[in-house]
Amino acid sequence: MRIFFVCQRVPFPPDRGDKITTFNEIRHLSAQHEVHVFCLGDGRRDLDNLSGLRDYPQSVTAVPVIGWKSKSRALKALFTGEPLSVAAFNEMKLHAAIRGKFAKLQPDLIMVYSCNVAQYAEHFPQVPRIMQFAELDSSRWGQYAERSRIPLRWIYAIEQRRFFAYERHIARTFSHALVCTAVEQRDFERLLPGVPVSLVGNGVDLEYFRSAGHPKRPASMVFTGVMNYFPNIDAVVWFCNEVLPIVRAQIPEVHLTICGRRPAAAVRRLAKGRGIAVTGRVPDTRPYLDGAEVFVAPLRMARGIQNKLLEALAMGLPCVASTAAWSGTVVAHEEGILTADNAKEFADHVVRLLRDGEFRAAMARKARAAAEANYRWDRQLACLDRVVAAVSAQCDLPVALERA
């Protein structure tokens, strides 16, 4: 089968949520089908990463998004009624490229990851199209509005309304929708009743993310993520301001490492605090995960599944997470993850794990076991294969598949 795969970012290296998913899906589909990838680059330098895909798809077409042009399009959209994020990613060169290749190659199926780039597949209603909603972005914009001040609160609220209308349009005009968690599926079915939707979850590379048994730094915690991303910024600022002082009152030597590229100014300022390190970009997060005793995921804004949490579990790292971060998993409470939303309860979980070595070791074993039992990529990608086969045949998916 010939598949066009459209995604928002160059899917290499697989070092953030959407790129992890798209890389693994493209690699898997390319082993069975003729896959042609169309994507946007994060500036021109990002195009250098295309070489990492050369062994998988038949071709990759990438167009760089230039920051000021993207922002200009979004600003204009504020007055035209279009979703700002759709306008921001509206690159005419990519539209032309996908139209040109479509005329030559006539694909059997188009798969799109991220509703922001669904616009590139709207030209081709005659072909079966799968829309993969990593999350319902309109809900994310609503979360941003709740956590932001005016005027951003107004802008995010506007984007929530516009983007939900766009999501509804895409979901109802494409052949099938995919989501990555049971929570997202329930929300999707409630908000978009009657639209065929299937669950294809994320996985984690269980061989790559495996503890090397390095010595742990006593009383140490770690958080990983792209650190100019609003939910990550909000999470670590809240944790350092509200939770860490409670932990430090009981464990004065406690240490937190915030590990991830592009730390925003608010994150960099946290490094001035006692026992807080901000690394910036690192070549490999595994040594930081392996050297910590506890992983914290205090995200107050979270949709879909948190790959950072899956990676921590795979490394055998006990986790303390917000309900929002934990709810995207299928891991039972205390089977590797402790959950809390208020600062005192969150701190109590952290203190218990740092003080009680026996409990911490048991939670570490459960964390790795949970990753092995639930997040093998081959299991998730087998679900994708079934959806692709059914949609390409233009036959109705059985109820059992929709609930898989």
Image: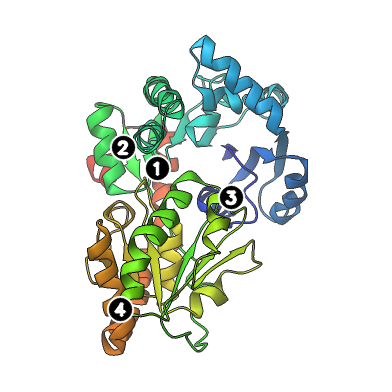
Q: Residue at x 30, y 78 (%)?
A: 250
> Disc 3 designates what residue?
265
Kindly indicate whether the residue at mark 4 contacts the one at mark 1 (C-beta within 8 angstroms).
no
- Res. 29 in view: no
Q: Classify 10 Å Cα crowding around label 3: few (below 14), some (14-19), many (20 and above).
A: few
- Res. 359 in view: yes
Residue 126 appears left or right of 309:
right
The amino acid type of the residue labelled 4 equals: Gln
346 in relation to 63, above or below: below
The amino acid type of the residue labelled 1 equals: Val
Q: Position of residue 336 (x, y in %)?
A: 30, 72
The answer to which of marks 3 and 2 sits earlier in the sequence is 3
Kindly indicate whether the residue at mark 2 contacts the one at mark 1 (C-beta within 8 angstroms).
yes
Residue 153, picture quadrant: top left
Residue 387 badge: 1
Element under disc 1: helix
Q: CA distance from mark 1 to mark 4?
A: 51 Å
Q: CA distance from mark 3 to mark 2?
A: 48 Å
Kindly indicate whether the residue at mark 2 contacts the one at mark 4 (C-beta within 8 angstroms).
no
The amino acid type of the residue labelled 2 equals: Leu
Colour treatment of the image:
rainbow
Front residue (pair 281, 33): 281
- Point out the residue furthest to the top here: 80
54 in relation to 395, above or below: below
Q: Residue at x 60, y 26 (%)?
A: 88
Comparing labels 3 and 2, the label whose residue is closer to the camera: 3
The amino acid type of the residue labelled 3 equals: Ala
> Disc 2 designates what residue?
397
